Image (cartoon, helix red, strand yellow):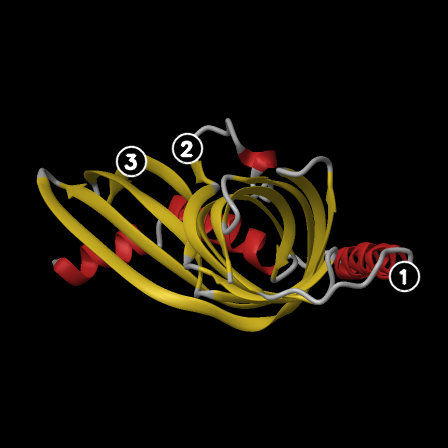
Amino acid sequence: MLIISDTLIYNNPNFINGLYFLMEFFYIKKENKMKNKLNTAIAALFVATTSMTAMATEVGGTYVTAGMMKLSTEEFDSVKGTSGVTVDDEDTAINFMVGYQVDKNLSVEAGIIGKGETSVSFAGGESGTLNGKSYSVSGVVTATAKTDASKMLGVKYASSVDENFDVYGKAGMLFWDIEGVVSAAGTLTYDGTTYTGSGTATYYTNDGSDPYYGIGASYKINSTTSINADYLKMEVDDGDVDGLNLAVAFDF
């Protein structure tokens, strides 16, 4: 009977349609998005480079930043509020950067953004008669996109507002690794007897690189310590990701 119950649950149209519905979001590719993001990042790099030539060159040292980044995506906005659909499109990740000051305005940076994930779930159910006996089935299908720690390599161009306050722009490449996991769990009641079933599978893996760019501000607490806040636009596997980062910077 357990095999029969699992078959009824996972062959149920609500589960199958829900699974296709969720997986569609992870397979749809926007062909022009990568080109637009790359053009924007190149433009930001060009502005930083041309601005640098107008500034006096002053070789600096190194710095390290450590902070927390709030990650969010708008990829599932179109299904928010849909009956039976639950969206979790935010996460928080650690962020570490190491930078080398090329001159008083331009620096080269490398770092990581910690693991993050987003998910969307479809819940459904139905009831009826099978072989002359009543049944009801309900459950949830969830698709989750998980990213491993992502690497960053780019440049930052800063300009002083006063002796303690700087504003800056940054651009570079994000190297990511993503995994798509789908899970289903449900309950079947058939002729007065209740059965349960569940399962999880990895249906998609990919890795690659995409441009990122952003703006930020820095406030100097003392000669070696600053508080940084920046906003980044990133792309992971053709999906737009926004990052709001708050960090402490230490100069050496």
Q: Which residue is mark 2?
A: 84
Q: Disc 2 versus disc 3: distance between alpha carbons?
A: 20 Å
Q: Is residue 165 above or below residue 69?
A: above
Residue lying furthest left: 193
Q: Disc 1 versus disc 2: distance between alpha carbons?
A: 56 Å
Judged by depth in the image, the label closer to the viewer, 2 or 3, is: 2
Q: What type is the residue that disc 3 sits on?
A: Gly
Crowdedness near tag 3: few (<14), some (14–19) or many (≥20) residues, C-alpha within 10 Å: few
Residue at screen point 78% across, 58% down: 41
Query: Helix, strand, or loop for circle 3?
Result: strand
Query: Helix, strand, or loop for circle 1?
Result: loop
Figure quadrant of residue 59: bottom right
Judged by depth in the image, the label closer to the viewer, 1 or 2, is: 1
Q: What percent of the width, then of the height, locates residue 246?
A: 49, 42
Q: Which mark is residue 243?
A: none
Q: What type is the residue that disc 1 sits on?
A: Thr
Query: Helix, strand, or loop for circle 2?
Result: loop
Q: What percent of the width, then of the height, locates residue 108?
A: 66, 66
Q: Which residue is mark 1?
A: 53
Judged by depth in the image, the label closer to the viewer, 3 or 1, is: 1
Q: Is residue 173 visible?
A: no
